Amino acid sequence: MLKRVDRIQIAVADSNAAERVVAEVFGAELVRRDKAAPLGARRTTMQAGASLVEILEPDGAGAVQDFVSKWQTGLFGAGFSVDDPGAAAHHLAKCGVGFEQSAGQLYLDAAATFGMRTVISQHQERASVGAIKWFYEVTNVVGDWQAASARYARIFGLDATKFSPIESKDFGYTGTLTLFDPPARLDRVEITQITDASLAMGRFHKRRGDSLYMFYVETDDIGALEQRLQARGARFAANRRDEAGLAGLFIHPSAFLGVLVGVSRTDHAWLWSGDPERARRAATDRARKP
């Protein structure tokens, strides 16, 4: 059922300042300003690559005000696209998942998704703008990755045989990638369960419980994005290199509205997503280009 990681939602106290950050980091462009009534929020939608960022500022009592009061700013929700929202609504209802419909979007009951606030929208193809291609992952840190995996396969109509197991001693987690449409695309929810509570993800889960932790973007020109970050004096860390050069980096939450952002060069993420040879071929092809 799910087609793309279509958007992310960030809760902020000051949407004007947040717009500047998203524009300067990703080269994002303003799409519209409106309200997200089910969340009690004023919403600014910006396009980065082919994906959308919804900046949510409280507009009275509601989930966004609660989030901002507790955490000030951060990753509030994940958005996925589908070809047929009506069919998606019917499927969710059959699965016993509560949701609210507003302005063509489905806002899922947060109790259904292990702390991952979720909005489902009509799929749209968009010409890419700015410094990235698209978003391809949101990371959902949970207490039981197997339970989350089984539920997401069921309520989101995903094929669990296409999921890819993951484990990291460096970051202290185990879990799975709920790949929506491999090998065509990388889009997925990364479901992680903590194995080392002393590391950053473990400390985050201890503070916030089951929740969204970060999101990932893909770009053809990671060096250009690195230069944008340097120009802003933004905090980031290059974390992956190969024969073709810089392949991955992390943007620190202090540089992006309290949100940790992972960046991968095009096709590099297949290295840990079930097709490492594809990633190696892409790196070799890139290294050979003049």
Image (cartoon, helix red, strand yellow):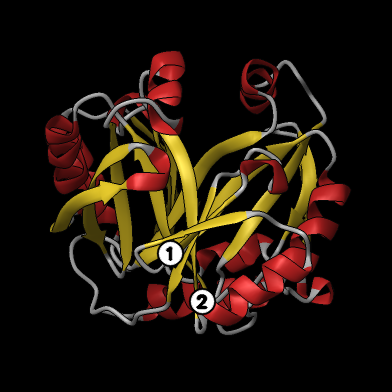
Residue 164, quarter of picture: bottom right
Disc 1 packing (10 Å; few <14; some 14–19; many ≥20):
some
Q: Nearer the viewer, residue 271 or 11?
A: 11
Q: Amino acid at mark 1?
A: Gln
Name the residue carrying label 1: 105
Q: Amino acid at mark 2?
A: Pro
The first of marks 2 and 1 along the sequence is: 2
Where residue 91 appears, x then y in whole percent?
A: 70, 74
Name the secondary structure under disc 1: strand
Q: Nearer the viewer, residue 77 or 207?
A: 77
Q: Is residue 240 visible?
A: no
Quadrant in the picture for the N terminus: bottom right
Name the residue carrying label 2: 85
Q: Nearer the viewer, residue 83 or 200?
A: 83
Quadrant in the picture for the C terminus: bottom left
Where residue 226 appears, x then y in whole percent?
A: 26, 46
Q: How many marks?
A: 2
Q: Residue at x 20, y 35 (%)?
A: 18
Task: State left or right for residue 139 relative to residue 153.
Answer: left
